[in-house]
Amino acid sequence: MIIQGVAHRGYPKKYPENTLSSFLKAVELGFTHLELDVHLSQDGIPVVIHDHTVDRMTNGTGRVADYTASELQSFCIKQDEHIPTLEEVLRALKGKIGLNIELKQMGTYYPQLEEKVLEVIKEFSMLDQVVITSFDFDALEKIRQLSSEVRIGLISFGCSKAILDWSVEMEATFLSMHYAFVTEHYIHRCQELGIQLMAWTINETSIMKKFQDYPSVWVCTDELESF
Ligand code: G3P
Ligand code: MG
């Protein structure tokens, strides 16, 4: 049976995560969905990077929130890459692949992150190509207040009746759950409720094989070669 794969941060095994080359390779490999992470620069521009600091991925140091977008873009990432803005990413991927855009609204609090992200998505008329996800309930509730159309989904370690009730109330039709907590019970409940379940992040072949029994669950992975 075929598992629906979601390219986690692009194709991070071969290209730096959350960069254009990484995303475009996922497209080239035939992936239909990818996951990426968004923070806000000091001057209010959504930028695509996983961590709250630039240290791990670039030759710079310090918090994303303390730099303007152009300062962030001046930092080098290996393989001649840079931190892309969300705008650059949407321009490059419009019509090519479904995007799971994770709002990193935790730790650093970014006022206006929700508005700015939605603004860029609307500018590119890509509401139908994205799902906005977050660990942060408030961020998703804010997104829902701003748009009744856009698809949203909570990211969580486990599941509970409360999480499903919240999803129904918020019309959140996506749920991103740590794979270890994905049980048959919740797979069935999500199917009944019309919620697309995604398990993250599965890189071990043995675990991936288990999910072959549950083709309704999307599998977020770094191991693009295994698909
Ligand atoms: O979508 C779930 C996944 O994004 C959580 O992992 O590491 O990308 O934040 P991470
Ligand atoms: Mg993420």
Image: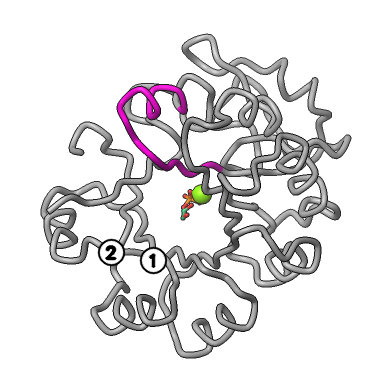
Along the viewing direction, whichever of 149 and 52 lies nearer the viewer: 149
Query: As drawn, which residue projects farthest toward the bottom?
Result: 161
Q: Nearer the viewer, mark 1 or mark 2?
A: 2
- Mark 1 crowdedness (10 Å alpha carbons): few <14, some 14-19, many ≥20: many
Q: Position of residue 96 (x, y in %)?
A: 48, 30
Number of the label disc, if any, that sits on residue 158 = none
Q: Position of residue 20 (x, y in %)?
A: 53, 22
Residue 108 against residue 20 in the figure, above or below: below
Which residue occupies 30% across, 72% down?
A: 182
Q: Is residue 72 left or right of residue 43?
A: left
Q: Position of residue 73 (x, y in %)?
A: 71, 20
In the picture, the quarter occupied by the N terminus is bottom left
Which residue occupies 61% across, 28% down?
A: 89
Please provide the residue range marked out in magenta: 23-36
* Residue hosting label 2: 216
Along the viewing direction, whichever of 204 and 10 lies nearer the viewer: 10
**Are the two marked residues, 1 and 2, in contact with CB atoms closer than 8 angstroms?**
yes
The chosen color scheme is one colour
* Residue hosting label 1: 197
Q: Is residue 56 magenta?
A: no
Residue type indicated by callout 1: Leu
